[in-house]
Structure formats: C-alpha cells, structure tokens
Amino acid sequence: MRFSVAVDDSPARYATGVKRLPEELRWLFWNIDVDALDVARDADVVLARVLKRGRLEDVRWLVRTYGLDRIHAFFRA
C-alpha cells in the first residue's frame, strides 16, 4: 500500500527575505558568529547544522524557510 501526502511546495509558500536566524535557533550555532550568518548565502551551513542537531520544531522552520526542493537538493549534493 502506498501513501501520499499533498504538499504545497511552491516557492511563494515559503518565507521570503529571511536574512537572520530566529533566536530559537541560535543555540545550534555556538561556534559561529550568528550575526554574520546569512540564511540565504549560508544555506548549506544552516541546513547541515539544523538537520544534524536540531529539534523537530527546528526542522519545521527549515521546511518553511527553504522548502522541500531545497532540502532535497542539499541531500543530493
């Protein structure tokens, strides 16, 4: 039996213009100058750290911010 989930993965669905990490995620980047971190420019760094050490709510932020296509591309790289 196969299950499918309808997901709206259109770019318009995701947060635009997000430049900085939310306060709730800063603890994950203890060894990085978070104020210099740009969410768009440093996407691979953010994705790697949140997927490795983040909580479920942190991963949900990733999905809202980057979208499933970008996260899948990260895994394929």
Image: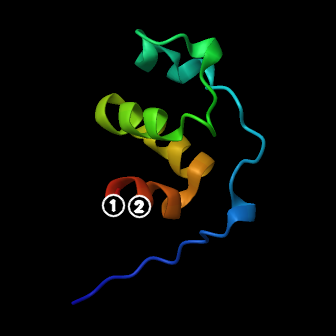
Asked which quadrant contains residue 2, the reply is bottom left
Measured from the top left, where is residue 33 in percent x and y?
Answer: 54, 10
Res 9 seen here: yes
25 left or right of 9 in image: left
Instruction: Please report the residue visible at 64 percent of the width from the left and 29 percent of the height from the top.
Output: 38
Asked which quadrant contains residue 47, the reply is top left
Q: CA distance from mark 1 to mark 2?
A: 6 Å
Which amino acid is tagged 1?
Arg
Asked if residue 8 is positioned above or below residue 43 in the image, the reply reads below
Using a 10 Å C-alpha cutoff, classify the residue at mark 2 as few (fewer than 14 neighbours), some (14 to 19) or many (20 or more): few
19 left or right of 70 in image: right
Q: What residue did someone put label 2 on? A: 72
Dot 2: element: helix
Asked if residue 36 is positioned above or below residue 75 in the image, the reply reads above
Q: What residue did someone put label 1 on? A: 76
Instruction: Please report the residue visible at 68 percent of the width from the left and 55 percent of the height from the top.
Output: 14
Task: Judge by depth and name the residue closer to the eye, 71 or 77.
Answer: 77
Instruction: Please report the residue visible at 53 percent of the width from the left and 40 percent of the height from the top.
Output: 43
Asked which quadrant contains residue 19, the reply is top right
Which amino acid is tagged 2?
His
Is the Cβ of the residue at disc 1 closer than 8 Å to that at disc 2? yes
